[in-house]
Image: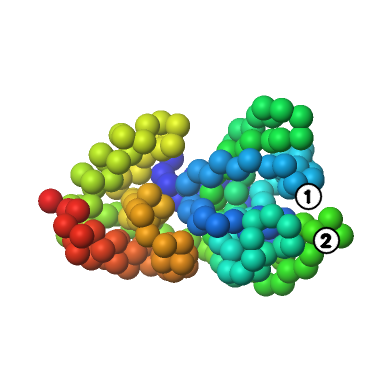
Amino acid sequence: MGFFDFLRRRALPASLDVPVFPLNTVLFPGGLVTLKLFEQRYLDMAAACMKEQKPFGVCLIAAGGETGTPAEPHPIGTLAEIASWEMPQLGILVITARGGQRFRILEKHVEPDKLLRAKVEPIPETAAVPVPPERLRLLPLLKRIVNDLGAERMPEPHYYDDAQWVGCRLTEILPVQNLAKQKLLELDDPLTRLEILEKYLEQRKLLS
């Protein structure tokens, strides 16, 4: 199964109603995020998502904070499915969620419990594209980082021949501002993303 098969493993309707979790991080398709939940709205959200086997949305915060009053999210985010969870103590839930398909917020509202919900439109992914020969120099660096991070942070399978997977993994691990990562998430062309990443790494002399 290829990376795009993973993203499409569940047929999605033209629009979805999902809870949205605004975060100070950018989740990419195929990426992992670990969240420590303690606010009741997010504990209830996680319980409902696990019971109904439904995703929630992760968006980078455009204004506001992760706790308290609902933050204003960037309009493009990533659907997330809970892969594992544990409750280290009463009232605290730690979940690991995996990014699926990207989406665009069409409309949103705040529920009485201050949970943000939105009608979202899944963004169709383009056909799978191999990493072009002129970008293969990105792979040794990515492979080293993946090996250093280990299976917990970068679980298999690894799709080193897929431009989308390579671009997503490089972007999420690079020490760049979240707003720059958001712009790269929003790109529809995986080859353009690789070109931008190569220029960034080359300028910092990180490529051999």
- SS at badge 2: loop
Q: Residue at x 37, y 32 (%)?
A: 150
Residue 96, compared with residue 115, is above or below; it is: above
Q: Residue furthest bottom?
A: 106
The percent coordinates of residue 31 (x first, y second) are 47, 46
Q: Residue at x 41, y 66 (%)?
A: 180
| Residue, disc 2 | 111
CB within 8 Å, label 2 to label 1: yes
Q: Residue furthest right?
A: 112
Q: Quadrant of residue 171?
A: bottom left
| Residue, disc 1 | 41
CA distance separating discs 2 and 1: 9 Å
Q: Residue at x 67, y 51 (%)?
A: 56
Residue 55 vs residue 197, the one in the foreground: 197
Disc 1 marks a residue whose amino acid type is Arg
Disc 1 packing (10 Å; few <14; some 14–19; many ≥20): some
Report the colour scheme: rainbow
Disc 2 marks a residue whose amino acid type is Glu
* Any part of residue 103 in sight: no
Q: Quadrant of residue 134?
A: bottom left
Quadrant holding the N terminus:
top left
Residue 52, compared with residue 186, is above or below; it is: above
Sooner in the amino-acid sequence: mark 2 or mark 1: 1
The percent coordinates of residue 119 (x first, y second) are 72, 66
